[in-house]
Image: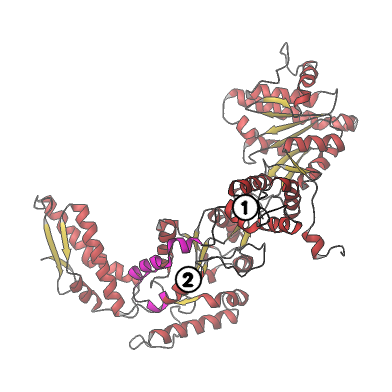
Amino acid sequence: MKPGSAEEERGRRVETSGHLNRIVGQVQAGAHVVLRGHLRDEVLVEGRIVEEPWGIARLLAERAGIQRVFVANQADGTFCVDPDEEESAAEFFAELPPVNSHDRPPALQHTEPLGVAEVVRILLRQERRPVAILLEDPAALFDGSSQEIGVALSVLLEGLAEAAEFPRGRDAACRNTLIAYGSPDGPPLQAMTALPGVEEVFVEVPDRGERLTALRDLRPHFYRGNNGGRPTQQDLETLASLTEGSSLNGLRRLSRASHAAEIPATRPEALHRSYRGESSETPLGKVGVERIMSGLGRDILGQDAALELVEKQLELGRWRPADRARGSRLTRPMATLVMHGPPGVGKTETGLILAEALLGSRAALHRIDCSELGNRHDVARLTGAPPGYIGYQEGGALTEVLARDCAVILFDEFDRANPRLNEILLGILDAGRLTDGRGRTATFENAILLFSTNLGFRKGENRGFSYVDPPDTQTFVDENERRLEEKIKDGEDGSPALWSRLRGSLVGYDLLRKPAVESIVANSCRRLELNLADEFGIRLSLAGDGFSAKLAGPWEQTWDGREVVRRVQRLIELPIRDKLYDLQRRDRLPEGADLSFVADDEGYAILA
């Protein structure tokens, strides 16, 4: 096998977690350490999975001369990592001089903030033997505004500042070290990192090499059924690929799940799907494309050709494709729709209906207004700022949404965003995953991506047809698509590379024609009947056909759905409300009254 070959990289082992080596390096250099990123996981030490405090203690003892490691937290006070050394650690601590005017130093068991802070300061000041203190979640320990907590934090910071000066005049073997980790947004860690001699170490999610090593350590624990057997190297490599983004704790739970599910690791894909509670059917298939299309057909009117294309795209996303390499995870979106055409004809409404069908609420649609992403730093809000920049711990807007079981994401007017968005979208469409500023990787396997644009249909441009005598639907949609492609290929708007990936997902929307206007008005009348009747406690009927004929009479090709809604409100809803409120004021609207409204000559609603 040649060094650097694909086979060697695929089977690469990482014997010790990378951040442990970085911690040891900082301690050897005389620094104190603040850990950020992926915390509270197990770690690898020489190919074995161990608890993180144990791993840190072992490497510090072997490489940095640290003879004893303590853990300090709010729940347990201060204790030695090695239980076998608890008694000698207590004796060692009792012999240390106090840090204040107390007759005796604080006990290791003290859990109040001031007691913990004084213990840490004593340990940092002592010179009998090199020690390290793992301070767990200082934000919780020093959370609050009481005077005692303020004093405790001051004591901790003073001890840290004093200890930072010791290495300059002392033997390296006598250095004491503080290693703190927890919420980086809390005042304690912010104050610590501002001190000289304190360095940050960012902890990454285990990479493929670490996962492969961990799975090898866990191999004896996987289920061995009659049809199973001992997992092979290839089985473990497949699992390592499938579990991208998993913690070492997660891999241990996966091994336990193989027992509960009685699925051996010799069937890695089935084991991984079972552990994640997945099936080969996507959320689209579980909800049912027929049900989704029923909702779209009810509310998206006059767009039969567009809905046929939508249905074809949704049908493709019902199942996870079986035609893929062993061990590869499906990460691309369930469906991708590029909706183009005039404004106000149902593009955004399509996304709202999909969100309601899949997630139970129209409010669950995650809409990204790309016109607000004109600058590169605006686009960064989608993925979050990288480490070292303000706000990186907030994560990204997209990765937060993808953490849910299912997502419907609309990039509204996507051609108007900064070119940086095109780069992100290219990565999403090619790899189906996105990594945010916190190092978390999210996949789009349970997402629907929607893109809307009016690029082929902009006001003030020569559209090549007359409003008086517009072309048929197919000609109109084809002409819009042609102009859209010309603009993108010429580099005038958008990205040619992105276009090449999206052109197979185009869904063209037609002008709002007269029959569609009549249907929209009729639908609005039915909703007004139900909602106003419920609001006023009456029985209400509207002559829907009459209103449709009146409102669609002066219809023009320039109308869109928003214009129809405005006319319905002005001509129908407001006159009805005015009449009902007037009847209420005069006590002439009894509970359960039966009222009917019709359209006058100008289309206004009047009492029949």
- Provide the secondary structure element on which disc 1 rests: loop
Q: Which residues are magenta?
A: 280-307
Image position, residue 277 (x, y; %):
55, 53
Q: Image quadrant for the N terminus?
A: bottom right
Mark 2, residue position? 315
Q: Nearer the viewer, mark 1 or mark 2?
A: 1
- Specify the farthest residue to the right: 171
Quadrant position of residue 86: top right
Identity, as a three-letter code, of the amino acid under mark 1: Ile
> Residue 36 versus residue 288: which sits nearer the camera?
288
Is residue 366 depicted above or below 567 in this figure?
above
Disc 1 packing (10 Å; few <14; some 14–19; many ≥20):
many
In the image, 7 versus 4, the foreground residue is 7
| Side (left or right) of 568 relative to 201 | left
Residue 17 among those drawn in magenta: no
Q: Residue furthest front?
A: 226
Task: Residue under label 1, please give it.
Answer: 263
